[in-house]
Amino acid sequence: MRLSGIQSTRLSHHVPRRFRPLPAQDADIVPSSLRKTLEAHRSSNRARLIRKVYPRTPATGLLRPWIPLENRAGYRPPEPLGTPLEESERSSKKPSGKRRTRKRIPETNASSPQNTHIIPIRYAEDITEQNPWIDFLASDYAIGDASTHLDAEIQAFDRYLTPTPHEQAPISQLNDKIASLLRSVAPHPPKLIGSHYTGLAQAHSDLHFLLPFEDIPRSRHQPRGPSATRPQIRDAHTTLLCRVESTLQSHDMFSGQVKWAGKGKSVLEARHQPTGLLLRFHCGETVPALSEYIRVQLPKYPALRPLYNSTRSLLESRGLFGLTQGNLGPEPLAILILAFLKMKQPGLSGSHRLGDHFLAFLKFYGSDINLQSSGIAVEPSGVFGADILRHSSPGEDTEPAHRRGQRSLIGAKRTASAKGNSPADRRLCIQDPTQYMNDLGRSCTRTPELQQVLSTAYERLSYACDTWEGRDMHGSILTAAIQANFDGLVALRKRLVCPVD
């Protein structure tokens, strides 16, 4: 029988309400007083709190190393003493209780050892200011048309930036000195990698050292062994780098010039005071596969190094090159040029074509493609994006490994765009030829600025070629694109040959 709405409402008033009885363990609840309930809960929480207490005197048999005051956490250097008038004014100004004030870090003198870094290449407004590479033109060079002259200039620019034997000698001595200093700290001698290993080093290039660290559980098993980035190995790398830091800090050449870089203390940086060179240390099992790849490809593509030096100086003068966040690093730049050469070289074959290569490179990456939505691959060479990958067959077992990697890299950019992550969405995408799932351009988030610089350089260089008259032997076409000041580089090279005591 179905009850009517009136009857169900009338019956609902006679149904007794059920209350949940309070559990026995809620003895801290006082129903009649909220204040007493809160106090009872606070008292109970304090009683249950377990705190770790360190004794003031160390236990027997426990050896704790002494840590210098300047290396302890929270240490701040003492402020320099001022005049009595300044001290009285400082004491009379008491900070307000509502606002927290920061202590101002005292500025260091420009001549002090703390400011030993020199910016080698700067942007110059006056394009006719400097062209020091003109003096490095080949002795048998005969002035010709714009294409021939630009080709000769790029070769001369490469010779200008290549370290001379007098500049290479201090670098070799510094390499031996580092090996001697770390002999008692590192289990294996450090290896010089980076641009000095691949063959793309310039006179002011940083020195990258690999501290070989043998991962026995990983090396003993099949290639698919334990992860190389597991916490145990990361802690072991950090411990080794801490010992390196302590050793370098105790030496006069690096005292006060050592700092941590990278994510999670993965890289240690040290500035060599006599020469001003920057040294970077990190741990690993072997030389990175990407460095080996570039080193093997360099003899096959002779145009790689001249184009690399010209493009690097162009980006470096605009603050777009380097290992800092947002910029394009040396190895990704080399892969960009190598991918271009593999894609475009058949149409630009022949001698004296470096000028045409450079113009085509600037136009291709500056305006022909959109680097924010497209990716660059070098093995096999080509451009990939969402439209290209959409026509391929995803999820099949026959899909090549490089295509699966490209799908993953483009998918990461699309996910970042959907989540509103603008820096990750506009970052440069370069597929690692040695590990298809790795994005070499991940750190370069200034892609629009990068393309704008390349596009502007192409327009200026094209105009300089069109207006070239070919009369002046010392005239320059490349200056229109580079547009840089090299006074810092000249000073650094002098300091490299004659180190500061």
Image: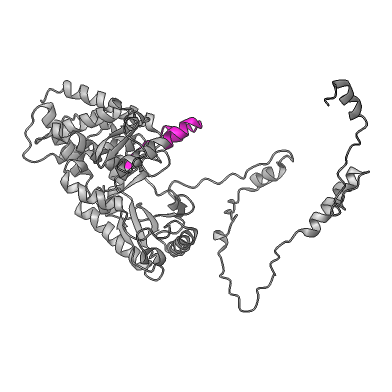
Q: Position of residue 454 (x, y in %)?
A: 30, 29
Query: Which residues are drawn in magenta?
Result: 412-431
**Residue 14 colored in magenta in the image:** no
Q: What sort of colour scheme is used for the picture? A: one colour
Q: Position of residue 133 (x, y in %)?
A: 19, 38
Q: Quadrant of the C terminus?
A: bottom left
Q: Quadrant of the N terminus?
A: top right
Name which residue lies at 14% across and 31% down. 347
Q: Position of residue 77 (x, y in %)?
A: 57, 54
User: As drawn, is 152 to the left or to the right of 208?
Assistant: left
Q: How many marks?
A: 0
Res 415 visible: yes
Q: Position of residue 416 (x, y in %)?
A: 47, 34
Res 474 visible: no
Residue found farthest to the bottom? 61
Q: Nearer the viewer, residue 107 or 431?
A: 431
User: As drawn, is 452 to the left or to the right of 46?
Assistant: left
Q: Quadrant of residue 500?
A: bottom left
Name which residue lies at 46% across and 56% down. 256
Please, is residue 180 above or below residue 143 in the view? below
Name which residue lies at 86% across and 54% down. 24
**Residue 416 colored in magenta in the image:** yes
Q: Nearer the viewer, residue 313 or 84?
A: 313
Q: Quadrant of residue 269?
A: bottom left
Please, is residue 346 above or below residue 179 in the view? above
Q: Nearer the viewer, residue 99 or 52?
A: 52
